[in-house]
Image (cartoon, helix red, strand yellow):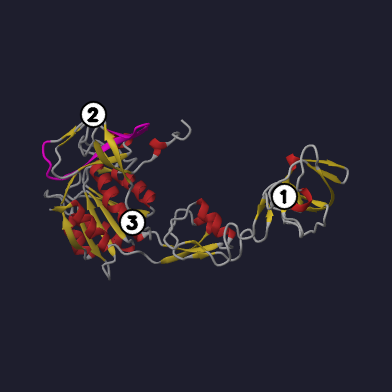
Amino acid sequence: MIEYSKAVEIILNSTKTLGLEKVFLDRALGRVLAEDIHADRDNPPADNSGMDGFAVRYEDIKGASEENPAILEIIAESKAGGELVKVEPKTAAYIYTGGLIPEGADTVVQKELTKVEDNKVFIFQELPKGSNIRPQGGDYRKGDLLIKKGKKLRPAEIGILSSVNKPTVYVYQKPRVAILTTGDEILDVGEPVEKLSQIRTSNTYSLYSQVLEAGGEPVVIGFAKDNPEDIQKKLEYAKSCDILLTTGGVSVGEYDLVKDFVVKVLGVEILFWKVKQKPGKPVAFGVWGREKEKLFFGIPGNPVAAMVVFENMVKPAIRKMSGEEKVFNPVINAKLKGGYKRKKGERVEFIRVSLSLTDDGFVAQPFGKQGSNILTGMVYAHGFGIVDVGVTEIKDGETIKVSVFDKSFMDGRYGD
């Protein structure tokens, strides 16, 4: 049995980033960029107006006021997408937001500071030279590095890609994650319950969702009974995937067969089994494939243990495979409400906590039942409070580190 930190180190050192693929922009959101993006031209490409008004020469409005307005002849109009026009001394051009600054003009006076009569505009305030002009290249210049390789693409980055005429872009491939659920007692959704000992799977679909959320492509390869023939048959389906994720069958019971058969069928090299963590001690991890580029995670069957192991171990591997640089969930400091005690401090423990944001900072409240089979606790949890090795008590109001996997507790905070 190894320390949790050592297990994570082995996992990440064994994880290789996948290859590249080209996708259209409408498929790029959430993917990790695999190429540097440079500007193909200046933005804005030329000086243009930041608002509706009149383009003028500063010299012609100098000293203008309510009592002594500058009076200029309107001789042209500049619209967004229109042609470049020209102004002469003592003249002005109608200009609209995005319109090119006319030749000869150096200032834009907003419409609210003017009055129009016939072909004349009355300007009632002097503005600083250059007012309301968006300069050429004010956002970026041709050749500028706009987005670095390794960036996870959000709506803002998609907008930049479009603005520099990149209808397709290279991104890192998504890892295909095979999910195999084992156990004679497990039923799929929709199957009838015929025995009191049978239970419907929760792990299959919670893990499926976690894989999606982490950026992977989940593939359910089936439900295997606790017998060698069925397990071997189902494992064959994993060969087209990058990660094999099994739930159940990795403990020390007579029917815990998965560890043995991933070695036999797939040639998995087991790198560790059992980790000093709670929940989720019976975790097996290994590598397989022609160049040991594929990963195997054998995680416990208890639903909370399965989700904890995924968040702390599997998700970072999926993110690294996908090209992400930041692979872990964010960790914050929070005040623990109500305190927490345990009998032994031999393992690092991840307790389910709900989070709230107060004027004094973050507050974490443990869910009452912390058993690894109590899935309802995950429904109310926003993160895992980390109880380090050697710690048996954290008192009410003391600080605890929390690994956050759900930020919804922040919703609505702005403007309160």
Determine which of the numbered discs, if any, sits on residue 241 in the image: none
Magenta-drawn stretch, dominant element (helix, strand or loop): strand
Q: Callout 3 environment at 10 Å: few (<14), some (14 to 19), or many (20+)?
A: many
- Residue at the image position 12 percent from the left and 42 percent from the top: 345
Q: Callout 2 environment at 10 Å: few (<14), some (14 to 19), or many (20+)?
A: few
The reply, left or right, for residue 243 in relation to residue 79 is left
> Could you say which quadrant of the image residue 21 lies in?
bottom left
User: Between disc 1 and disc 2, whose residue precedes?
Assistant: 1
Indicate whether residue 202 is drawn in magenta.
Answer: no
The reply, left or right, for residue 369 in relation to residue 147 is left
Distance of label 2 from label 3 (alpha carbons):
35 Å
Disc 1 on helix, strand or loop? strand
Residue 162: image x %, image y %? 57, 58
Distance of label 1 from label 3 (alpha carbons):
52 Å
The amino acid sitting under disc 2 is Gly
**Whether residue 221 is visible:** no
The amino acid sitting under disc 1 is Val
Disc 3 on helix, strand or loop? helix
Farthest bottom residue in view: 290
The amino acid sitting under disc 3 is Ile
Q: Which residue was labeled with disc 2?
A: 338
Q: Which residue was labeled with disc 1?
A: 108
Indicate whether residue 353 is drawn in magenta.
Answer: yes
Q: Which residue was labeled with disc 3?
A: 318
